[in-house]
Image: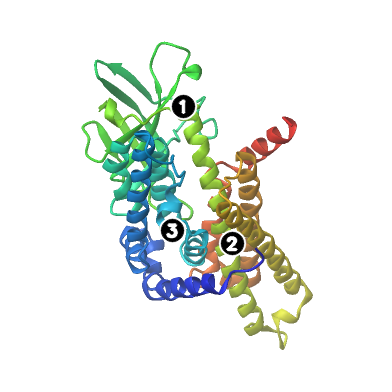
């Protein structure tokens, strides 16, 4: 794949028109944190029939799984949350992400965590009953999901430093602990929560368990949105659990590798998706920079005639081509039914996140004083792009995953 197809471009243009009509007029309210993004995301789903595609795909999948369980049909189709929403069309998954990230990357973060991480975990690890109970509402965006693994004192040492615990008491588990930097945390209806089984072993050796929790459960407190540098259109909060009681019906099946492997699978989904998010930011920054270089004049000529400005634009275009190729490769992998390895996803994220941040900051520099002003949108995009190098694993963590894979061969 070297270019979008005509059908892809029709989808792209339709999404662009919707964004112009629905998102851009609300951009100030979104960036100020005054407007939660969820009604806009639901509008996107309904406008393009993504909710109905997700519903049809969900019922088809469950039918196949039940047939396989009874020995009368084929096995699990293996779709994740994004595939459910896009009806298996890789471009339908990627193009809205790219286009939304040109305007409000936070909308994609909020949507991606609810769909790809919360719903994705339930669809991969849940029983048929758990999928029906929680999965469909998340896949259609009727409810908002959060994926809670990060803690105040764990950070990049997500598993080893995890302090949240679940203690077995009779037929229930009693959960205690806190989580921070949780996307959708303040508004989530459904929370996929990771913690350690309190079984007396050394904390670093304990089994990781994954529970599905609901808003309003006794002992569960969801904070107000935290103030942060960028991605203001994506609410981020803290979770506090004090003796939250969860039955075994809320415990997701461990499967191969348990909760640790479940989380790693989601890291692959999240990191690979950052390439598409980065492409949106890069394309928009390049477009705005070219327009400004053509219209802004100094010393009697447009600034685009100066070689230093041309160098900035040329480097932006190189970054755009490279990240676009990573996205195209990912689309082809999806079509072929192949999932990137953790190292491949880490490589995609490392390069694309750095490229997006560098391009956005160069756009601010190219705009000069205007670039530092909010009305010239590169300021917001630069703040938003920086987050790509931090969430879903910092740049430094991506390096370790790539290097360990190389050294283990």
Q: Which residue is mark 3?
A: 86
Q: Is residue 391 left or right of residue 343?
A: left
* Image quarter of the C terminus: top right
Which label belongs to residue 279?
2
Residue 29: x and y in percent read 36, 65
Q: Is residue 391 visible?
A: no
Q: Is residue 255 left or right of residue 286?
A: left
Query: Of helix, strand and loop, which one carries label 3?
Result: helix
- Of the numbered discs 2 and 1, the one sitting upstream in the chain is 1
Query: Of helix, strand and loop, which one carries label 2?
Result: helix
Q: Which residue is mark 1?
A: 258
Task: Name the front one of labels 2 and 1.
Answer: 1
Q: Is residue 319 above or below residue 216?
A: below
What crowding class fits label 1: few (fewer than 14 Cα within 10 Å), some (14-19), or many (20 or more)?
Answer: some
| Distance in Å between CA atoms under marks 2 and 1 | 33 Å
Give the quadrant of residue 292.
Answer: bottom right
Q: Are marks 1 and 3 in contact (CB under 8 Å)?
A: no
* Image quarter of the N terminus: bottom right
- Residue at 40% of width from left, 50% of height from top? 115
Give the quadrant of residue 368.
Answer: bottom right
| Distance in Å between CA atoms under marks 1 and 3 | 28 Å
- Of the numbered discs 1 and 3, the one sitting upstream in the chain is 3
What crowding class fits label 3: few (fewer than 14 Cα within 10 Å), some (14-19), or many (20 or more)?
Answer: many
| 253, 168: nearer the viewer | 253
Residue 173: x and y in percent read 29, 22
Q: Is residue 352 left or right of residue 75?
A: right
| Distance in Å between CA atoms under marks 2 and 3 | 19 Å
| 131, 75: nearer the viewer | 75
């Amino acid at each position: 794949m070297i270019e979008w197809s005509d059908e892809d471009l029709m989808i792209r243009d339709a999404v662009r028109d919707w964004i112009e009509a629905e998102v851009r007029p609300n951009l100030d309210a979104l960036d100020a944190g005054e407007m939660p993004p969820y009604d806009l995301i639901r509008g996107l789903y309904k406008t393009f029939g993504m909710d109905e595609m997700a519903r049809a795909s969900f019922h088809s999948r469950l039918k196949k799984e039940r047939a396989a369980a009874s020995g009368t049909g084929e096995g699990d189709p293996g779709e994740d949350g994004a595939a459910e929403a896009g009806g298996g069309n890789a471009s339908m998954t990627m193009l809205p992400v790219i286009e939304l990230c040109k305007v409000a990357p936070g909308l994609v973060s909020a949507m991606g965590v609810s769909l790809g991480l919360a719903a994705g975990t339930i669809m991969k690890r849940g029983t048929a009953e758990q999928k029906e109970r929680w999965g469909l509402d998340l896949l259609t965006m009727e409810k908002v999901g959060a994926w809670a693994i990060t803690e105040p004192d764990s950070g990049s040492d997500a598993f080893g430093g995890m302090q949240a615990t679940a203690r077995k008491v009779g037929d229930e588990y009693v959960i205690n602990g806190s989580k921070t930097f949780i996307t959708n945390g303040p508004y989530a209806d459904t929370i996929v929560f990771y913690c350690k089984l309190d079984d007396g072993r050394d904390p670093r050796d304990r089994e990781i368990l994954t529970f599905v929790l609901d808003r309003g459960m006794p002992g569960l407190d969801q904070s107000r949105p935290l103030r942060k540098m960028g991605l203001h259109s994506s609410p981020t909060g803290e979770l506090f659990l004090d003796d939250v009681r969860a039955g075994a019906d809320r415990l997701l099946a461990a499967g191969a590798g348990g909760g640790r492997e479940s989380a790693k699978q989601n890291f692959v989904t999240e990191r690979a998706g950052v390439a598409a998010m980065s492409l949106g930011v890069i394309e928009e920054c390049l477009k705005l920079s070219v327009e400004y270089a053509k219209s802004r004049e100094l010393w009697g000529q447009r600034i685009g005639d100066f070689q230093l400005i041309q160098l900035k634009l040329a480097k932006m275009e190189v970054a755009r081509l490279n990240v676009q190729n990573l996205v195209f490769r990912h689309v082809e992998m999806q079509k072929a039914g192949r999932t990137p390895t953790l190292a491949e996803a880490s490589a995609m994220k490392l390069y694309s996140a750095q490229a997006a941040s560098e391009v956005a900051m160069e756009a601010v520099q190219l705009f000069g004083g205007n670039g530092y002003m909010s009305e010239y949108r590169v300021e917001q995009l630069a703040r938003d792009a920086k987050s790509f190098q931090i969430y879903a694993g910092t740049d430094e963590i991506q390096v370790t995953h790539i290097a360990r894979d190389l050294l283990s061969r």
